[in-house]
Amino acid sequence: MLLMKGIAASPGISIGKAFIFEPDKLKLERKEITEDGIAEEIIQFKEAIERTKKELIQVKKRVMDEVGEEYAKIFSAHLLVLEDPFLIIEVERKIKEERINVEYALFSVLETLTSSFSSLDDEYIKERAVDIHDIGRRLLGNLLKQKRVNLELEESRILVGHNLTPSHTAQLNKEKILAFVTDMGGRTSHTAILARAMEIPAVVGLINITSLLKEEDTLIVDGNRGEVVIKPTPEVIEEYSKRKKEYELFITGLANLKDLPAQTKDGFRIELCANIEIPEEVDLVKEHGSEGIGLYRTEFLYLGRNTLPNEDEQEGVYKEVARKTFPYSVIIRTLDLGGDKLSLHLKQPEELESNPFLGLRAIRLCLANVDIFKTQLRAILKASVYGNIKIIFPMISNLEELIKTKEILREVQEELRRENIPFDEAIEIGVMIETPAACMIADMLAEKVDFFSIGTNDLIQYTIAVDRGNERIAHLYEPLHPAILRLIKLVIEAAHRRGKWVGMCGEMAGDPLSCLVLLGLGLDEFSMSGVVIPEIKEIIRSVTLSEAKEIATEVSKLDTAQEVKSLIRKRFSKKLDKVLLRSENG
């Protein structure tokens, strides 16, 4: 028996035999062509594009029928890639100038595109490389006249593969595919988003599971904890079967919570919101009971393209999210990228920074490139009349940055007034609290904004000086470190003294153990991944505010994060055993 830990991509528990999924390898060969052969290669390319478009339209229709229009938009984006002038022009250029066959020219261009995505730090953006690979493989398959992989199984199985593309995922029949596990992949991929929508348990990022399995091996997939058990003993199968039944009962109970308020037993109301990356996620998080969007990351609009998104394009996307979220609010975070990601578009392309996390990024980049910043602000303001939009500025570390940022915002607002373009004149403005410096001047910042949102992912790594991506020191990345709890308390108290509300959009907000302490510290809004909203709501509805305040007071006297965790388990384990167990192991 072997227990493996991966990334929990889609919740649920399944037990079954393995089906090893190995797509046929594409046989590519570089061939020299003559001048006379160029036109024929280009004709083949255009015909393959048209065939691929027809196939993707069918995939899109299937997804629309089975899981909804929002998820079908994933394949609308794939169709747009097929029309991308860069892809078409570059392939044709290679055929003409390098005199090579169309298959190899396309392969070369796709390699360039996928490597540019894969080299980026942001997990969400990295996962777009899988989309490019998906589209490219389908296009190459049509050029080579290769048959499509059949995923219609006769018996129920757990699919095991190196990676799974969105197109493959869309073919899965949840009656026959009990779950899937892959070597590659991340939680923000379109594959993971589709799996959650289709309610297929999944664990990804297992690195080498395909090399450890044989067809028909028995597997247990725990998509809640990110665990896979290979060749489990009868005792372990029995244990997970029990967990599976408990989880299914738990989920049935959580579904009943969807329309209930996040309110403590003594009547204190909390706002539970979701973090999203793309517009397609709005409907999914609403299904989980989200009361708005606490963090809308806008970076996807800027990456993997040759031109910056214009004002109209941005306005259209922001308008769509605002309309879908209304009457609840959506907090739009302005551009939070480093200069290295936008070097092609900056007036003075940035040199490679040795430490981009401490470099020209987020609000610093925007203040250094005001034209890019103003375009985004205009788009957000114009969209604000279609819903309840708030704006939040990332990475503010001093008062001067905030003053300058607000000056630029006022300039944009005045421009719109002169042009008779309506916008929400009372739009709320907030700042992300992500550095120890921002925490220490929270009282001053609170005088100039309407709200705070604590970005604990960055705050923790900057405070404890730990890169959580570094496996050797990742264990030091501890949300319940006494220093972190003290900084959070300081920020909340500074804001409340000035009548401002405080939210949190880091992963800590969706952690059941941390939830109790944050509730007791006075946090007003929790924003998290949509799938964990029901669990956090259950916790909030299971305690009184006075109990949460007591636990917050008690943990403030403790010296270590481990002591904090032990106290919470001791005080609340009977009441919240199932939720806390998943938190500690997931």
Image (cartoon, rainbow, N blue to C red):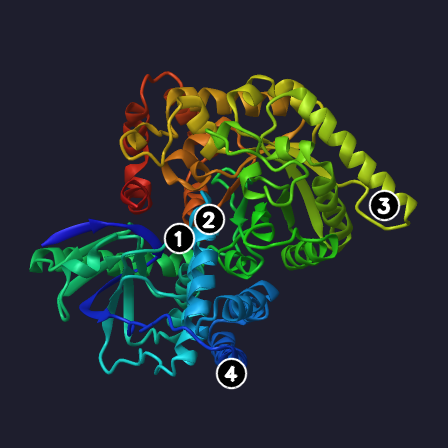
**Rendered image: mark on residue 40:** 4
- N-terminal of the pair, mark 4 or mark 1, is 4
Badge 3 marks a residue whose secondary structure is helix
The residue pinned by badge 1 equals: 187
Image quadrant of residue 369? top right
Q: Pointer 1: residues within 10 angstroms few (<14), some, or many (20+)?
A: some
Q: Are marks 3 and 4 in contact (CB under 8 Å)?
A: no
Gap in Å between the C-alphas at discs 3 and 2? 35 Å
The residue pinned by badge 2 equals: 529
Q: Image check: 188 left or right of 174? A: right
Gap in Å between the C-alphas at discs 1 and 2? 10 Å
Q: Pointer 2: residues within 10 angstroms few (<14), some, or many (20+)?
A: some
- N-terminal of the pair, mark 4 or mark 2, is 4
Residue 62 rendering spot, x and y as whole percentages: 47, 79
Q: Amino acid at mark 3?
A: Leu
The residue pinned by badge 3 equals: 416
Residue 498 appears anywhere in the view? no
